[in-house]
Amino acid sequence: MRPISIPANIQKHNQSKEVLQSGIAAIRAQLQKLYSPTPEVSIVIPAYNEAENILKTLSSLAASTTRKSVEIIVVNNNSKDETEALSTSAGATCITETTQGITPARNAGLRRATGKYVLNADADTIYPPDWVDRMLEPLHHDGTGMVYGTFSFLPTTGIPRPIFLAYEYVSDVSKWINKRFREEAVNIYGFNSAFRRTEGLAVDCFNHPPGTNEDGWLGVKLREKFRKKFCQVTHPTAIVWTTDRRIQLDGGLLIGIMKRVRRHASMLG
């Protein structure tokens, strides 16, 4: 079952920049406990003008319960606000990628990473405490090449949280159809996926042909080169919470639902 309301362990990070700044020393201390100069895990976060959101993301990652050593890399993609300063103050490693765009930013983060595993995150998303371990568990099996997770929406436009459930359940059906009948790689999102660093580098990182997406195309390349499968993590404690601006890119909530219904109606019929 999907959550109707935002869990308390997520809501505590869903605070204003000013509130989180007042506790930035605690965030930095928690991230330092996770950090190692030879980490097992690299969490890469592209960021462009994310001063209002980045501390939410870093605060949530700092609360991770994993025992694995972790480095957090924020890729500042020409931000004009306080994204870099806030990231650095919170204890993350911040690098700059001057070529604008999500693909160059993700590539820069992957090339900078030193962990065995790379977890893709975004600067407008809040992560639960179990996220790191839940996402990496399938990669302990050699037959898995890339892992992708489940997400829910944080309302930012005044729409009550329960309304988003319809969209999320329709999206779940869409993902199931893609997995069974179409192309599972389109289910992979860059803010909630994981792979082995050496394998990602071996397939030319996130570079992709025109008309495709960097995250799903990476999955296709990994599958074809290494003959490994995808794995979706659906455990309820691994659900990540992202802002609803992705819905706005779909044209709004109702339009997004109708797009998915029409897309699959002929196949279901």
Image (cartoon, rainbow, N blue to C red):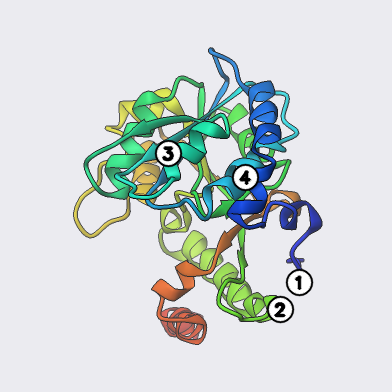
The answer to whether residue 119 shows anywhere in this view is no
Amino acid under disc 1: Ile
Identified at 64% across, 38% down, the residue is: 24
Is 158 located above or below residue 224 in the figure?
Answer: below
Q: CA distance from mark 1 to mark 3?
A: 34 Å
- Mark 2 lies on residue: 162
Q: CA distance from mark 2 to mark 1?
A: 5 Å
C-beta proximity under 8 Å, tags 1 and 4: no
Amino acid under disc 2: Pro
Q: On the rendered image, what quadrant is the N terminus found in?
A: bottom right
Extreme top residue here? 38
Extreme right residue here? 8
Which quadrant of the view contains residue 40? Answer: top right
Q: Disc 3 or 4, which lies upstream in sequence? A: 4
Identified at 67% across, 32% down, the residue is: 25
Amino acid under disc 3: Glu
C-beta proximity under 8 Å, tags 2 and 1: yes
Which quadrant of the view contains residue 267? Answer: bottom left
- Mark 1 lies on residue: 4
Of badges 1 and 4, nearer the viewer stands 4
Tell me if mark 1 has few (under 14), some (14-19) or many (20+) residues whose alpha carbon lies within 10 angstroms of its own: few
Amino acid under disc 4: Gln
Is 13 located above or below residue 170 in the figure?
Answer: above
Of badges 1 and 3, nearer the viewer stands 3
Identified at 67% across, 57% down, the residue is: 14
- Mark 4 lies on residue: 21
Of badges 4 and 2, nearer the viewer stands 4
Label at residue 84: 3
Q: In what element is the residue under mark 4?
A: helix
